Amino acid sequence: MVGAPPLLDNFVTVVVVVVVVVVVVVVVVEIVVVVVVVVVVVVVVVVMVLVAIVDDTDVEGDCDDSCSLFIFFNSNLYLAIFQPYRMP
Protein backbone atom coordinates (compact mmCIF):
# COMPACT_ATOMS: atom_id res chain seq x y z
CA MET A 1 0.00 0.00 0.00
CA VAL A 2 2.97 2.28 0.53
CA GLY A 3 3.88 2.17 -3.20
CA ALA A 4 0.39 3.16 -4.37
CA PRO A 5 0.47 6.94 -3.84
CA PRO A 6 3.73 7.51 -5.84
CA LEU A 7 2.29 5.41 -8.69
CA LEU A 8 -0.89 7.46 -8.57
CA ASP A 9 1.18 10.68 -8.49
CA ASN A 10 3.14 9.50 -11.54
CA PHE A 11 -0.10 8.72 -13.40
CA VAL A 12 -1.55 12.13 -12.57
CA THR A 13 1.69 13.81 -13.65
CA VAL A 14 1.66 11.95 -16.97
CA VAL A 15 -1.99 12.83 -17.58
CA VAL A 16 -1.36 16.50 -16.77
CA VAL A 17 1.70 16.61 -19.06
CA VAL A 18 -0.22 14.94 -21.91
CA VAL A 19 -3.16 17.35 -21.51
CA VAL A 20 -0.83 20.38 -21.47
CA VAL A 21 1.04 19.16 -24.56
CA VAL A 22 -2.22 18.53 -26.44
CA VAL A 23 -3.57 21.97 -25.53
CA VAL A 24 -0.33 23.67 -26.60
CA VAL A 25 -0.28 21.77 -29.91
CA VAL A 26 -3.92 22.63 -30.63
CA VAL A 27 -3.34 26.33 -29.85
CA VAL A 28 -0.22 26.45 -32.04
CA VAL A 29 -2.02 24.72 -34.93
CA GLU A 30 -4.95 27.14 -34.65
CA ILE A 31 -2.57 30.12 -34.67
CA VAL A 32 -0.78 28.76 -37.75
CA VAL A 33 -4.08 28.17 -39.55
CA VAL A 34 -5.29 31.69 -38.74
CA VAL A 35 -2.01 33.20 -39.95
CA VAL A 36 -2.14 31.21 -43.21
CA VAL A 37 -5.75 32.23 -43.83
CA VAL A 38 -4.96 35.90 -43.14
CA VAL A 39 -1.95 35.82 -45.49
CA VAL A 40 -3.99 34.18 -48.26
CA VAL A 41 -6.80 36.73 -47.87
CA VAL A 42 -4.33 39.64 -47.94
CA VAL A 43 -2.62 38.30 -51.07
CA VAL A 44 -5.96 37.80 -52.84
CA VAL A 45 -7.13 41.31 -51.90
CA VAL A 46 -3.84 42.87 -53.06
CA VAL A 47 -4.00 41.06 -56.40
CA MET A 48 -7.65 42.08 -56.86
CA VAL A 49 -6.78 45.71 -56.09
CA LEU A 50 -3.85 45.64 -58.52
CA VAL A 51 -6.05 44.10 -61.22
CA ALA A 52 -8.69 46.76 -60.59
CA ILE A 53 -6.05 49.51 -60.83
CA VAL A 54 -4.69 48.11 -64.08
CA ASP A 55 -8.22 47.60 -65.41
CA ASP A 56 -9.07 51.24 -64.61
CA THR A 57 -6.04 52.45 -66.56
CA ASP A 58 -7.02 50.41 -69.61
CA VAL A 59 -7.17 52.63 -72.71
CA GLU A 60 -10.08 50.93 -74.45
CA GLY A 61 -12.19 50.52 -71.30
CA ASP A 62 -14.08 47.43 -72.54
CA CYS A 63 -11.96 44.81 -70.82
CA ASP A 64 -13.41 41.87 -68.88
CA ASP A 65 -11.76 40.11 -65.93
CA SER A 66 -9.64 37.69 -67.95
CA CYS A 67 -8.41 40.55 -70.13
CA SER A 68 -7.53 42.65 -67.08
CA LEU A 69 -5.56 39.73 -65.62
CA PHE A 70 -3.73 39.39 -68.93
CA ILE A 71 -2.97 43.12 -68.93
CA PHE A 72 -1.81 42.96 -65.31
CA PHE A 73 0.63 40.13 -65.92
CA ASN A 74 2.04 41.92 -68.95
CA SER A 75 2.17 45.35 -67.36
CA ASN A 76 5.13 47.35 -66.13
CA LEU A 77 3.60 47.31 -62.64
CA TYR A 78 3.76 43.51 -62.52
CA LEU A 79 7.32 43.51 -63.85
CA ALA A 80 8.37 46.16 -61.34
CA ILE A 81 6.95 44.14 -58.45
CA PHE A 82 8.01 40.63 -59.42
CA GLN A 83 10.98 41.04 -61.77
CA PRO A 84 13.57 41.33 -58.95
CA TYR A 85 12.45 37.95 -57.59
CA ARG A 86 12.49 35.99 -60.85
CA MET A 87 15.12 33.34 -61.35
CA PRO A 88 17.91 34.38 -63.73
Image (cartoon, grey):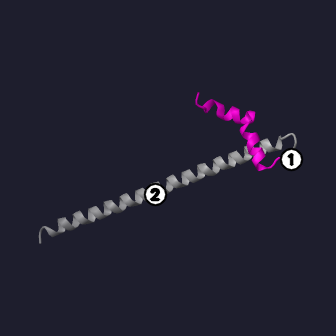
Q: Which residue is mark 1?
A: 62
Q: Residue furthest top?
A: 88
Residue at image location 38% in from the left, 60% down from the top: 22
Q: Residue furthest bottom?
A: 1
Q: Which residue is mark 2?
A: 27
| Quarter occupied by the C terminus | top right
Look at the numbered disc 2 and give the secondary structure of its residue: helix
Q: Earlier in the sequence, mark 2 or mark 1?
A: 2
Which image quarter: residue 68? Answer: top right
Is disc 2 surrounded by few (<14), some (14 to 19) or many (20+) residues within 10 Å? few
- Callout 1 amino acid: Asp
User: Residue 66's x, y, as percent?
Assistant: 75, 48
Residue at image location 27% in from the left, 66% down from the top: 12
User: Residue 61's x, y, as percent?
Assistant: 87, 45
In this image, 40 relative to 15: left or right?
A: right
Residue at image location 36% in from the left, 60% down from the top: 20
- Callout 2 amino acid: Val
User: Residue 34's x, y, as percent?
Assistant: 55, 55
Residue at image location 18% in from the left, 65% down from the top: 6
Question: Which of 41/51 is in front?
Answer: 51
